[in-house]
Amino acid sequence: MEVKNEARTVPDVDVDALVIVGFEGTPPEGHAAGQIKELYDSGEFSGKALEIAILHRPAGLKAKRLAVAGGGKRDKFDSAELRKLAGAAVRSLKAKGVRTIALSLDEAFRSDDFVAAAVEGAILGDLEADRYKTDPKKNEKQVDSFAVLGGSQSGLDRGRILAEAQNFSRGLSNEPANALTPTLLAERARQMASEYGLECEVLDQDRMRQLGMGALLGVSQGSAEPPALIILRYQPSTPAASKDHLGLVGKGVTFDTGGISIKPADGMEKMRYDMSGGANVLGAMRAIAQLKPAIPVTGIIPAVENMPGSKAQRPGDIVTSLSGKTVEVLNTDAEGRLILIDALTYAQRLGCTHLVDAATLTGAIVVALGNINIGAFSNNDAFCGKLIAAAKTEGEKTWQMPMDEEYKELLKSSFADLQNIGGRSGGSITAAMFIRDFVGELPWVHLDIAGTAWLDDAKPYMGKGATGVGLRTFVRLAETW
Ligand code: BES
Ligand code: MN
Ligand code: ZN
């Protein structure tokens, strides 16, 4: 799907469908106003968010159809609402065989952020996780172009870069684990880095042994697939004013069986998205390479497969992490935190001054926040506030969780410095407290995306599967440093 600006005005665009926003209460004025008012009067359309009504041969327009898309309450309409509206419009019009779409926005909603959001919604809504379906008819219904009337080039470019990066991440997370092992993920990272001019380095198992990444290697030892530690570097072309250096660390478990503490069979197939944190960091680096923020950013993805087997780590095993601290592994299914601590220690050695990690870390965060909010955990409220502000701008709902000292009690081990689980209650918090022990004094935010990285069912604005959540927040955080 091509996205573009359209200089022609409403009556002149000869697209298959022209989309306008209709808010609750008052029908939009202007072209085809009579027909639109009839729609409202009939009760068929009320302007509620994501509603869509389609008029054929709208009066006075060259467009074949006028699609009125519900914007909800006008005073609540923001770029996040527009993103969803554009996605819903593309998905529903595509299903009807529409190939060319143009979106007309009121003057008030034509700033760069709105235009970017519209383009993002369209591109995100267009992605379907159907690449393994062989039905030749599956591509018969395709949207060829999505145009924004009177949109700015900068808004359009930003939206395209972010959404294409996000679809890249979603594509990786949607891949089955047989098609995306740690080695193959590293290969994809290398390719992407060379395409966008990022430096890429991959540490192999031998190198990680030399360095002493015992926590990460303990997780990967049960798999026939070797681990990989992927490192991507972005340097701004003009030297930065400060010494700040952002590190983005993403959990890259290409499949999580739970290991010896094996998971139940029901729903285990979804654990291919346990590398979403890593995929979304990769996508963020791809967008950062193009949007060029002023601060250096390093992306680090520890990639492993968590398998049971005769070489697998056992409950009770004690591993020595890269930091030197020892960990008693009481549950091999709490593997994400084990790979993250070695990656975060390594990030500090690479000179990162601020750390953000993203991980599908706990089922407990799904219990706490459902599938709506990312859980944020931090040792630094100012930094966390900055990240949450970036998330808000980007329409990625994020909720800060508590990190009281008292929770640390639960991680005391009888035999090692720490144990890797804290028991049933407060599971997402004890997981975060565990990681916190390895970031020292550096400002750090941990994002638990277990509830938000995957859609079990399609939304009107996005297909089933991986969401790419967090990516836009990372990029905005770097841009607004
Ligand atoms: N990858 C899972 C967490 C997860 C759960 C992600 C549901 C997405 C959806 C993680 O590695 C895990 O297994 N966590 C355990 C930790 C427990 C053993 C302390 C969990 O949440 O049950
Ligand atoms: Mn697990
Ligand atoms: Zn996991």
Image (tube, grey):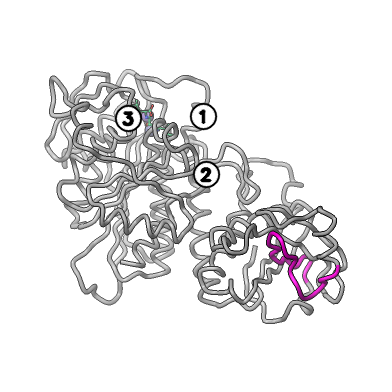
The residue depicted at 64 percent of the width and 44 percent of the height is 130
Q: Position of residue 316 (x, y in %)?
A: 22, 18
Q: Quadrant of residue 353?
A: bottom left
In which of the image's four quarters is ligand 2 placed? top left
Report which residue position mark 1 lands on: 269
Of tags 2 and 1, the one toward the viewer is 2
Left or right: residue 476 compared with residue 320: right
Mark 3 residue type: Gly
Q: Distance of mark 3 from mark 1, alpha carbons? A: 26 Å
Q: Distance of mark 3 from mark 2, alpha carbons? A: 26 Å
Camera-nearest residue between 30 and 63: 30
User: Label 2: few (<14), some or many (≥20) within 10 Å?
Assistant: many
Mark 1 residue type: Glu
Q: Distance of mark 2 from mark 1, alpha carbons? A: 13 Å
Report which residue position mark 2 lands on: 466
Image: magenta residue range: 15-34
Report which residue position mark 3 lands on: 426
Mark 2 residue type: Ala
Q: For the N terminus, which image quadrant?
A: bottom right
Name the disc covering residue 313, or none.
none
Q: Is residue 383 above or below residue 21?
A: above
Left or right: residue 312 compared with residue 11: left
